Each structure stands twice: as C-alpha cells, then as structure tokens.
Amino acid sequence: MKKILILVIMCFLISGCYDYVELNDLSIVSGIGIDKKENEYEITYEILNDKKQGKESAQQKSILISGTGSTLPEALINATKKSPKQAYFAHLKLLVLSNSVAEEDMEQLVEYFLRNPNIRSEFYMVITTNSTSKEIYESANEESPVISEQINTMIERNFKTKNNITTDNFEKIVIDFLEKGYDAIVPTISLEDKEISLNGNALFDGYNLKNLLDSEESLNMNILKSEAKNAIYSFNCPNNSEEKITLNIYDSGTEFKIDDKNKLKINVSLMAEIKEFACKDSLKDIDTYQKYNKLYAKEFETKLNDFYQILIDDKADILGIGKKLYNKTRKYDKDAWANLEYDLNVDLKINKDGLIFEVKDGN
C-alpha cells in the first residue's frame, strides 16, 4: 500500500514538471501599451526576456513587440501574432493608455479587458499625458530594464511617500466605472528626458475623461477619500509670507452626511506633524499649537472646498456622493449630487512630542 501511495505522489510531481516545461513555450507579457493615431490603434507588448536567446539578448530583460489595426481587438490580435511564442497574460502588471485612448475609447477598452478570460484584472492602469505609451516602454535603460515593474514600484512607493495618486488596480477602477453613483479615477504619468514621473490623477464622469489633477489636487482628493497617509503641505507662517511651516498629514478621515433637508455635511479630521518650521512662535508653548490648529484648519478648508468645486464642475463623483444620495432617497439622478448645498469643516490636530492638543469651537 505504501509503495502504491509513493507511485501516486511521483505521478503528481512528474505532471508538475510537465507544466514547468510548458512555461518555456510562453511569452510572458508584463506590460501593454495602447496608442491611437487618427483611426488606427497601435498595441505594444513588453515581454519578459527568457535569457535563452543568445549572449547579447540575455542582457536585455524585456523586449517590445507592436501591432496595429483599425479596431482595438484587431490591433491586439496583430500584436499577439508577432510574439515569438504564445502570449501569456496571467502575469500582466501594467496597462498604459495614451491620452487620446483614454478620451475616446475607455468604455470599449474596459469591456474588452473584462471579457478576455486570459487576462487577470489585478494589474495597474495609467494614462500618459505627454507621450505615447510606446515611448513610455521604450524609455527602458540599464537601471530600469522592465518599465512595467518600474512603474508598479513607483505607484506602490508613492502611496507611502508622496501620496498623490490612487493605487487602485484595474479591477477596482472598473468597479467604479460600473457602479451607479460613483465615478472613476486613474493615475497619470509623464515622460521627460526619458524619465518617468507620476503626475496625479485623471477624473472621469462616466467613461468621459473630464480633468487631469495635479499633485496637490490629488493630495486633496486623497484627504477627502480618507486615504492620506503621508501628505506634505507647506504654508506661510502667520504674518510672514516669506517663512514656511511644513505639515505632514499622516492620517485622515472624512465623514459625509446628508441631512433631512438634503444638505451635505463634509466633516474632515486630520492628524498632522510638523516636518519643517521657520516661524517665530515657540513650539514649546501649547498656545502655539492651539493657534496653529485653528489657523491651518481654515487653510485646509479653503483647499478642500476649492477641490470639491472642481468635482462639481466636472460632474466627477469620485467620492460616491450620488450613491449616498440614492441610498437616502431611493431615487437615482446621476448628477443630482452636484446640486446639493454643502458645508465642509476641518478638524486639525497637530501632534507635539507624542501629545495631541485638541481645539474645540468656543475654547
């Protein structure tokens, strides 16, 4: 009996080796780029090099292949035909879209990738604002030989440092596109002198690209989405426009409430620490923190009100206010949320040596 069991286990192990050999016949696609010029699409695949194609190519960690077509599926098929082996998308890390594709074809693109059973949806999607997606992949060098891996790392690191883009993957973004009472946001990148940088985010109203947020606007967005983990802001010192104070918002929480009169109340709580300080006040004085809590809470209120007005103007409901309104009224009107009267308040607490000084109205 024991011998039979050993033979069965060996059979499973042997079949596992068979699967491993089959992987050698696949071209692992790590990144996809989609561009559009006039009425023709160009698809670029970044394929991981298997390092078995000769001495010179072994030093190259990825190769690019491209295909064109009058439709998106045709271009994708034509690019796949140029793959040296069977294209394999299960390890796809990145989808880069040119600005024109994001403006004109987002709905078609989302539907295609959702229906494709060979592509998993855990990859990141970004929009390039000043170059083609192919140029993004062509910027590979010795330090960053695989662009899809580089941008993946940049996105994940940014959330822990600059905190000015969304880190939602394709699956989460698609949910936002499809869900009633919610609009999507997509990270944006740019290319300058072959250097890739993360810019901010693109706002959508339905599948319509409405606006490109810069870095600070994206910080404000993350605060309202309760996702600010390391958001850096600089302000002028009181009564001195030349000196600066820099605050790090290390935690945030935003509460949205719609009252019985359909007035929206936005209450924002911010936890901050001082990173740089050139003001004349003494940080050893508790009164300094009380004054600064009140003063810079008003500064944040101004910034966040300005940002919320951008959302209203663009009808970009990335905060899901429309969904909250529907849950309350059980009546769906896509843009009704933008007509709500609203009041936004900020409660700022600046941390001093591990202690938190709280300032309440009337104190």
Image: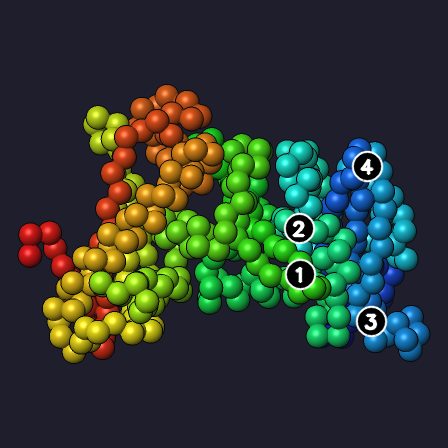
Marks 3 and 1, how far apart at CA: 23 Å
Q: Nearer the viewer, mark 2 or mark 3?
A: 2
Query: In the rendered view of the protein, which quadrant contains the N terminus?
Result: bottom right
Pointer 1 and pointer 2: residues touching (CB < 8 Å)? yes
Graded by Cα atoms within 10 Å as few (under 14), some (14 to 19) or many (20 or more), the crowding at tag 2 reads some
Q: Earlier in the sequence, mark 1 or mark 2?
A: 2
Mark 3, residue position: 60
What is the distance, in whole Å, between disc 2 and disc 4 at their CAs?
19 Å
Tag 3's secondary structure?
loop
Q: Which mark is residue 40?
A: 4
Q: Earlier in the sequence, mark 2 or mark 3?
A: 3
Residue 181, given in percent of the width and then of the height, sits at: 43, 32
The residue that label 1 is drawn on is 192
Q: Earlier in the sequence, mark 2 or mark 4?
A: 4
C-alpha separation, residue under disc 4 versus residue under disc 1: 25 Å
Q: Residue at x 25, y 31 (%)?
A: 263
Looking at the picture, which amino acid does disc 4 mark? Glu
Q: Considering only order in the chain, which callout, 1 or 4, is on the residue closer to the N terminus?
A: 4
Q: Residue at x 13, y 71 (%)?
A: 286
The tag on residue 355 is: none
Circle 2 residue? 130
Left or right: residue 171 compared with residue 191? left
Instruction: Using a 10 Å C-alpha cutoff, classify the residue at mark 3 as few (fewer than 14 neighbours), some (14 to 19) or many (20 or more).
Output: some
Q: Position of residue 6 (x, y in %)?
A: 74, 73
Task: Give the number of the mark in front: 3 or 4.
Answer: 4
Q: Is residue 254 left or right of residue 176?
A: left
Q: Residue at x 69, y 40 (%)?
A: 101
Counting the numbered discs, the total is 4
